[in-house]
Amino acid sequence: QVTLKESGPVLVKPTETLTLTCTVSGFSLSNARMGVSWIRQPPGKALEWLAHIFSDDEKSYATSLKSRLTLSKDTSRSQVVLTMTNMDPVDTATYYCARTSYDSFGYYPHFDSWGQGTLVTVSS
Amino acid sequence: DIQMTQSPSTLSASVGDRVTITCRASQTISSYLNWYQQKPGRAPKLLIYAASSLQSGVPSRFSGSGSGTDFTLTISSLQPEDFATYYCQQSYSIPGFTFGPGTKVDIK
């Protein structure tokens, strides 16, 4: 059974750095046809993709947030860590991690399993 | 970056209705289009990937079509559990994996 679980602070102050951890089970982060993305959703608003890490450790970041985001992974601990610097109240959102899978030919990435999400509030 | 739009933003329908949601990409994305369903307080759930492939376990009343820039999600006969918000997402380009703004399906 595939599961993902986000963990981290529920409250951060403006200008602080947010560190979120996604712990996965049921699959390996070194699997060539798997990856992990982070997505956020401000209250009452749409989903926003933030960043993705591939099995070969290649990373990709949303253009608008690239300067503030860093992804890393620890395959042995089955964890992917997202850091976001200089937090602002507009960053208040539920943050999700999701597994990226591909079709049987290795194409068409899609998020087939999601964590439950963690609500992060940015306030002084 | 590729931008995604959806229409309508809100759709009022009744149980048993046939429902169609449209998604458009700002440039061609071939068939790299996914659809998700999200209910309040829950994580999104994958319905369709590669524009028309039904995710395992998803009821067959859901179907997807399209390629290039224009895509549709169709629910053939709306069920009570289908009232939710639906998002399209492109997975053609990196950086990307852009989501559309969502379509809320509510009860008429």
Image (cartoon, helix red, strand yellow):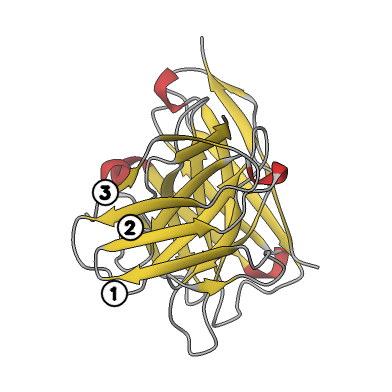
Q: Residue at x 34, y 69 (%)?
A: B66
Picture coordinates of residue A112, whole percent (x, y)? 61, 64
Within-10-Å neighbours for mark 3: few <14, some 14–19, many 20+: few
Residue A17 image label: none
Q: Residue at x 52, y 77 (%)?
A: A102
Give the total number of marks visible in the rendering.
3
Tell me where residue A27 sits by quadrant: bottom right
> Height in image: B101 above or below B57?
above
Q: Is residue B101 above or below residue B74?
A: above
Badge 1 marks a residue whose secondary structure is loop
Which residue is identified by label 3?
A63
Q: Which residue is mark 1?
A: B30
Please name which of the two marks, 2 or 1, marks the residue nearer to the observer. Answer: 1
Q: Residues within 10 Å of mark 2 (few under 14, many from 20)?
A: many
**Residue B8 higher or lower than A111, as above or below:** above
User: Which kind of residue does numbered mark 2 sit on?
Assistant: Gly
What residue is at 64 percent from the left and 69 percent from the top?
A: A75
- Can you identify the residue that label 2 sits on? B96
Q: Pointer 1: residues within 10 angstroms few (<14), some, or many (20+)?
A: some
**In the rendered image, which quarter contains the N terminus of chain A?**
bottom right
The reply to whether residue A49 is in sight is yes
Task: Work out whether residue A67 or residue A116 is closer to the camera in this orientation and state it.
Answer: A116
Disc 2 from disc 3: Cα separation? 8 Å
Q: Residue farthest to the top? A: A124
- For label 2, the SS is loop
- Check disc 3 and report its element: helix, strand or loop: helix
Of badges 2 and 3, nearer the viewer stands: 2
Of labels 2 and 1, earlier in sequence is 1
Estimate the spatial distance between the alpha carbons at disc 2 and disc 1, rounded to whole Å: 14 Å
For the question of whether residue A88 can be seen, the reply is no
